Image: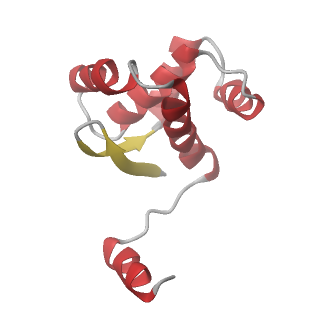
């Protein structure tokens, strides 16, 4: 249940591990279910977006210090909609599950036009 995408200076893996969900709940002051509902209602706080991306980076293997640098450099100055979409993809990967497509399979699909 990871999400891998180009963010900032390269490909990054985001994962809301159980530990990161608990940290996210602590930082946002609401449970994961309420946080997901906020996104569905478009009633989220800016902090919600930033914390999902930050904890997702850490859960994906980025050090906490590097995650904060990436947030400060590549998330905070961007339009809210860009970071909102990334945050929702990270949250949704954990909520609904997301199967990562093997690189060879993705390449074969791209070559075949599918």
Apparent side of residue 92 relative to residue 37 in the rendered image (left or right):
left
Q: How is the image coloured?
A: secondary structure
Is residue 113 positioned above or below 39 on the image?
below
Q: Nearer the viewer, residue 1 or 48?
A: 48
Q: Quadrant of residue 46?
A: top right
Instruction: Spot the residue most to the bottom.
Output: 112
Kindly identify the residue that appears in the image at 44 percent across and 50 percent down: 2
Kindly identify the residue that appears in the image at 60 percent across and 44 percent down: 92
Instruction: Spot the residue most to the right.
Output: 41
Q: Quadrant of residue 38?
A: top right
Instruction: Spot the residue most to the front.
Output: 79
The mark tally for this picture is 0
Kindly identify the residue that appears in the image at 38 percent across and 84 percent down: 111
Apparent side of residue 67 relative to residue 77 in the rendered image (left or right):
left
Q: At which x and y percent is residue 5?
A: 37, 49
Kindly identify the residue that appears in the image at 49 percent across and 28 percent down: 52
Q: At which x and y percent is residue 45?
A: 61, 15
Q: At which x and y percent is residue 36?
A: 68, 32
Q: At which x and y percent is residue 26?
A: 53, 14
Is residue 84 positioned above or below 109 on the image?
above
């Amino acid at each position: 249940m990871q999400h891998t995408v180009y963010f900032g200076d390269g490909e990054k893996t985001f994962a809301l591990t159980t530990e990161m969900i608990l940290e996210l709940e602590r930082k946002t002051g609401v449970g994961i279910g309420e946080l997901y509902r906020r996104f569905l209602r478009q009633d989220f706080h800016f902090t919600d977006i930033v914390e999902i991306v930050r904890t997702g980076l850490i859960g994906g293997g980025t050090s906490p210090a590097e995650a904060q640098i990436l947030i400060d450099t590549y998330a905070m100055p961007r339009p809210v909609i860009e970071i909102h979409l990334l945050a929702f993809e990270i949250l949704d990967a954990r909520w609904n599950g997301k199967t990562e497509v093997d690189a060879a399979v993705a390449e074969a699909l791209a070559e075949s036009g599918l």
